[in-house]
């Protein structure tokens, strides 16, 4: 169905100054002053969408209207891409998944329309928390996150966690602009003690049935997955139900041979990212479905936030309060909290137990 579109321009006047003090990975203070400015957010929507719904859509899409940093500055402020680990005794190749970060950033710059940064801060107007960087020098761990939007994607977040040989993680989620009824692209790559490696790359469906999306997508993924026998594993049901928000063509791997990372995982990851953007560009926008699609993205966020097995690691390294905000206000910012959530249970898990729990999760 081809929707009739009405071009709306909402002037957004923001006048504020926020000063955030960071301690960077090179142990120097960085003072970032972000000055808001008037701008105009432009998108397609339908004239008959009610005001409340339209404002909700506006608040989400408007995040990209006045970026405080350029795309390049968002990386450079914390020295990304990192060339060496927080553990200075390690060789340069300790940053196992940094080539994935670098390739993705270059791909985004070269292929996305109107790529711009969006905030990594919580929405608490009185006590906003900037989730772009956190470090625990005593335990030897640091985490950096950036966030972007484009005409094709409402939000693309990227996170890299470096704890030397103990743990390396690259995580990214691509949320399509809600005028496209399409799955979310999810990427989660983990390494523990240079012995155990875990990977998920998937077009994560926002509906139970593939046919409820604008276009079939598993047929595009199957020939890619078929090329990589090492990425055809099945996940455990310990944390997630693979029938919810996971496709039949998910790349899943649990392995101990590090050579698989470059031989199979890297090219498969590249093909999935390229295919997702291709699918977006082949999809006819349907603006009258935007409120419903946003609700499905919210359901995805809530499901993921309440089950994320990494929350225990973040809590142990950076504190429960920070970990809770990082998961609910940044990683899965549309999520709804529950008092007895899986996140709160996971927050008490020590790093060693997290490794055991996560390994069990992928091995059962």
Image: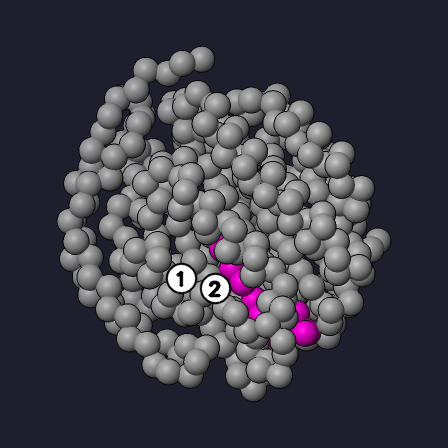
Q: Residue 75, which numbered label? A: 1
Pointer 2 and pointer 1: residues touching (CB < 8 Å)? yes
Q: Residue 29 sits in which quadrant?
A: bottom left
Residue at image mark 2:
81
* The residue stretch that appears in magenta: 158-167
**Residue visible at 40% across and 62% down?**
75
Can you name the residue that lies furthest to the right here? 364
Magenta segment includes 160: yes
Which mark sits nearer the N-terminus, 2 or 1? 1
**Residue visible at 32% across and 40% down?**
114
Q: Is residue 328 above or below residue 109?
A: below
Q: Residue 6, which numbered label? A: none
Would residue 199 be visible to someone looking at this image?
no
**SS of the residue under disc 2:** loop
**SS of the residue under disc 1:** helix
Q: Is residue 188 above or below residue 1?
A: below
Please name whichever residue, 280 or 292, is drawn nearer the observer in this view of the structure. Answer: 280
Q: Residue 108 sits in which quadrant?
A: top left
Q: Is residue 21 above or below residue 241?
A: below
Q: What's the distance in space between the residues labelled 2 and 1, CA to CA?
A: 7 Å
């Amino acid at each position: 169905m081809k929707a009739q579109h009405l071009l709306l321009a909402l002037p957004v006047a923001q006048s504020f100054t926020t000063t955030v003090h960071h301690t960077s990975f090179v142990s120097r203070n960085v003072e970032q002053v972000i000055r808001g400015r008037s701008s105009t957010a432009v998108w397609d929507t339908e004239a008959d969408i009610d005001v409340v719904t339209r404002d909700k859509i506006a608040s989400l899409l408007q995040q990209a209207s006045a970026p405080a940093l350029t795309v390049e500055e968002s990386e450079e402020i914390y020295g990304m891409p990192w060339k060496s680990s927080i553990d200075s005794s390690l060789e340069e190749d300790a940053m196992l998944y940094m080539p994935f970060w670098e390739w993705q950033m270059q791909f985004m710059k070269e292929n996305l329309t109107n790529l711009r940064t969006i905030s990594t801060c919580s929405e608490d107007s009185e006590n906003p928390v900037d989730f772009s960087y956190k470090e625990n020098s005593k335990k030897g761990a640091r985490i950096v996150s950036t966030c972007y939007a484009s005409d094709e994607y409402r939000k693309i977040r990227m996170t890299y966690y470096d704890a030397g040989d103990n743990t390396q993680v690259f995580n990214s989620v691509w949320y399509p602009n809600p005028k496209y009824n399409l799955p979310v692209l999810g990427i989660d790559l983990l390494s523990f003690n240079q012995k155990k490696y875990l990977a998920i790359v998937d077009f994560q469906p926002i509906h139970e049935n593939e046919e409820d999306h604008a276009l079939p997508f598993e047929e595009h993924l199957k020939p890619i997955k078929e090329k990589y026998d090492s990425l055809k594993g099945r996940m455990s049901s310990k944390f997630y139900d693979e029938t919810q928000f996971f496709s039949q063509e998910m790349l899943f791997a649990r392995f101990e041979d590090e050579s698989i990372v470059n031989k199979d995982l890297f090219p498969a990851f590249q093909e999935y990212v390229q295919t997702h953007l291709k699918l977006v560009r082949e999809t006819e926008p349907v603006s009258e479905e935007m409120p419903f699609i946003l609700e499905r993205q919210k359901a995805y966020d809530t499901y993921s936030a309440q089950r994320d097995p990494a929350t225990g690691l973040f809590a142990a390294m950076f504190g429960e309060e920070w970990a809770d905000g990082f998961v609910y206000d940044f990683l899965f910012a549309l999520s709804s909290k529950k008092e007895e959530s899986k996140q709160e249970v996971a927050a008490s898990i020590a790093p060693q137990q997290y490794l055991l729990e996560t390994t069990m999760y992928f091995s059962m």
